Image (tube, grey):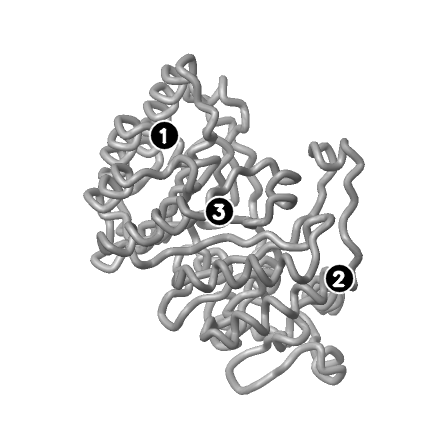
Amino acid sequence: MPKSCYIHIPFCNNICSYCDFIVDKYLNSLEKEIENTYLDEELDTIYIGGGTPSSLSLQELDKLFNILNKLKKSKNIEYTIEGNFESTTKEKLNLYKKYGINRLSFGIESIDKNNLKLLERNINKNKVIEIINYSKKIGLRNINVDLIYAIPGETIATLKKDIDFILNLDVSHISTYSLIIEDHTKLKINKIKNISEDLDFAMYKIICNKLSSNHYIHYEISNFAKAGYSSKHNTCYWNNNEYYGFGLGASSYIGNVRSTNTKSINKYLNNDYSKFIEYLTKKDKEEYEVILNLRKREGINLQEFYNKYNTKLIDVYDYSSLVKDKLLILDEESLHISEDKWYISNEIIVRLLGCEIK
């Protein structure tokens, strides 16, 4: 039974007057999708992501929140909205508070001029501080900020300045992402290359050491939180639990089915969701469990794995050689990757999946 829900708002800061009709029609289609799909479960988490949800106008946000009032929320729900500082205002923060939002997630990425130019972002440090302080003032204290590192041309000194700036904000959660230059992106087209693996690893270690020494718990490969502030919504994904996904291109996992909505805005506006559907076998679900669980500090809970699949993990994947090589750690309750090996977690997971017992 799904206990979490993701809402996708695909629009960005460059919404122009001509787009107003599209946004309104999009919200109407979103409402219809929820009405036709949602089965009235009580939800523990709702996450409004994008795109840039904060780019919606006050009127559009008000309409969105009224639509989401159709969702039944648990008493201790974690209710998150993403945004950036350029489009976030005090009025929007007050509206969030009015409708029960209790967690904010902002993309800072960097405060360095050269990094921001390459990423085509426009961050004003004073605006960042103003919005963070006002959010706390009105009681929205559960705040995540994103940091991007390994940006071409970035130095260790630049990275340290970014980290220090974020630490001074005193937020409850920090997500960190190494910049990967993907095919068909503007950076790739402009022949910008990824930094060396050695420098990437050096930056990763600096981030881990600096945040840990400032009382942030490194609870997942890319995520750090103060005690009690780990992301409940993202933990749903890493636990391989079921969830709804509503909106353009949104993904769901319910029962034995993983599905993804169409990425065609025209189809979606005409209430044609054209879902891509993946029907999961027991083996598929066990594999997802391993891949996702091993992102977490605590790894795979062996008893929970047995409870879900009626089989022991060791009878599915013979992990003994990886434990012997100290790439995986086995204790009474779990199988996990030690933090000092997280940087090579993908290689460890691939090797583990290759240990499948036929």
Q: Which residue is mark 3?
A: 107
Q: Where 286 sits versus 34, above or below?
A: below
What's the amino acid at mark 2? Leu
Distance from Cα at disc 1 to Cα at disc 3: 16 Å
What type is the residue that disc 1 sits on?
Answer: Leu
Whether residue 145 is situated above or below residue 226 in the rendered picture: above
Q: What SS does tag 2 mark? A: helix
Distance in Å between CA atoms under marks 2 and 1: 38 Å
Q: Is residue 106 left or right of residue 69?
A: right
Residue at left offset 50%, top offset 48%: 108
Residue 38: mark in rendering: none
Could you tell which of marks 3 and 2 lies nearer the N-terminus?
3
Q: Pointer 1: what residue?
A: 56
Depth check: give the residue in front, 242 or 138: 138
Residue drawn 76% across the image and 49% down it? 194
Residue 94 horizontal/vertical position (percent): 23, 42
Q: Local crowd at mark 3 within 10 Å, few (<14), some, or many (≥20)?
A: some
Residue at x-position 65% and y-position 65%? 204
Where's residue 46, x and y in %? 34, 48
Q: Which residue is mark 2?
A: 199
Residue 263 picture quarter: top right
Please tell me in which quadrant of the rendered image residue 156 appears.
bottom right
CA neighbours of label 1 inside 10 A, class few (<14), some (14 to 19), many (20+): many
For the residues labelled 2 and 1, say whether their Cβ atoms are less than 8 Å apart: no
Q: Circle 3 sits in a helix, a strand or a loop, which is it?
A: strand
Q: Look at label 3 and name its amino acid.
A: Gly
Res. 300 visible in picture: no
